[in-house]
Image: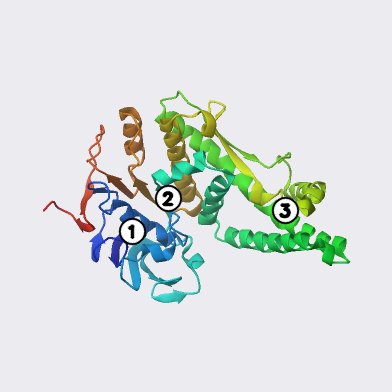
Amino acid sequence: MIIRKLKYSNFRNLKDSELVFGEEMNIITGENGQGKTNLIEALWLFNGVKSFRSAKDKELIAFHKSHAEIAVDFYASERLQNARIRLLSGKRENYLNEIKKPSSAYLMGKITTVVFSPENLSMIKGGPSLRRKFIDSAICQVKPKYSALLARYHRVLDQRNALLKENKKYADFSGMLEIWDNELAVVGGKIIAERISYIDTLSRKACVYHQGISHGKELLALSYRNGYDTQTTPAQMTEDFRLLLQKHLNEDMQYGFTTHGVHRDDVEITVNGKNTRLYASQGQQRSAVLSLKLAQASLIDEITQSKPAILLDDVLSELDNDRQNFLLNEISGTQVFLTCCEYPKADKRFSGKIFYVSDGVITTQKE
């Protein structure tokens, strides 16, 4: 998959323009606060998901403007295609090959990108929800139907929570709860199976990348944490989940919501056997996230037979020269968008395009 062209209007601070990209390295350089990350963000939105900066769509629209629009021409499935996103206050319109789609989900799997940004460090520093979100989003990129499975789980979860909250109002509480428990266990078991399978493969690939980045000094590993043995069959995972819900029923009734389950599970990330959130340095945490992102890109290529574009925003800061050099040489051979304040230094000089950003204006030569 290659992104050929990006056109944008009224998007954040970027001045309306159209950019043509190179097929490999695209370096986006300029001082801080000029709009480099906004360009990366525009490309990311075509995954059919929210901004990696956790911004609301209305915040993507330039001040005093009623709407914004971004459009790309991209080459995938052996043909040139196009996609367009129109951002309105509280609404997003999505078009694929000039056909309007009902939701952003229809863009999933059509334009695939993997992004690294400083915000991604919260995956390690923050709580379990951020790590679950990373894994779930990564699975959706290679299995778009997984998003429907997640949505189904949360619908059933909402129903169970509503029942728990008002349990004294229902004469047949036990019978109704059994229905929702069975449904939640079946869907939850499938989600757990998908997560474990993906994490197992991702961990092996990320370990290889991390050993390269750290020159063999560090061993990265991921493991799924849900409070009970997960090395079982999908059917057993469903049964284990059902038993977990029964075990914590009194607690759930006391609090009025489901205290354990897929929505509370965690992914532990370790370096040399130590939890990265508690014991890793800033550089180690950044290297760990980079390794996970490179492994994610490799899995997308392996499963979909299409290389994703790699979006690297402020990736080089806090990495020593050896780690920078490994990274820049490892990502050669695929389309990359790299933001930086200065042209990166590495053993290999990259061919490609350089874009200069100043106060929202992007040019391909200094003025």
Tell me if 346 is positioned left or right of 326 in this view. left
Q: Residue at x 74, y 47 (%)?
A: 237
**Mark 2, residue position:** 114
**Mark 1, residue position:** 3
Q: CA distance from mark 1 to mark 3?
A: 43 Å
Q: Residues within 10 Å of mark 2 (few under 14, many from 20)?
A: many
The residue lying furthest to the right in this view is 171
Name the foreground residue: 147 vs 284: 284
Please tell me whether mark 1 or mark 2 is closer to you in this view: 2
Q: CA distance from mark 3 to mark 2?
A: 33 Å
Contact (CB < 8 A) between labels 1 and 3?
Answer: no
**Residue type, mark 2 in image:** Val
Mark nearer the N terminus (3 vs 2):
2
Is residue 1 at all visible to an observer of this figure? Answer: no
Secondary structure beneath dot 1 equals strand
Please tell me whether mark 3 or mark 2 is closer to you in this view: 3
Is residue 320 at all visible to an observer of this figure? Answer: yes
Place of residue 269 in the rendered image (x, y in percent of width and height, measured from the top left): 55, 36
Residue 184's place in the image compared with 172, above or below, is above
Labelled disc at residue 258: 3
Tell me if 151 is positioned left or right of 72 in this view. right
Q: Residue at x 50, y 33 (%)?
A: 207
Place of residue 290 in the rendered image (x, y in percent of width and height, measured from the top left): 43, 39
**Residue type, mark 3 in image:** Thr
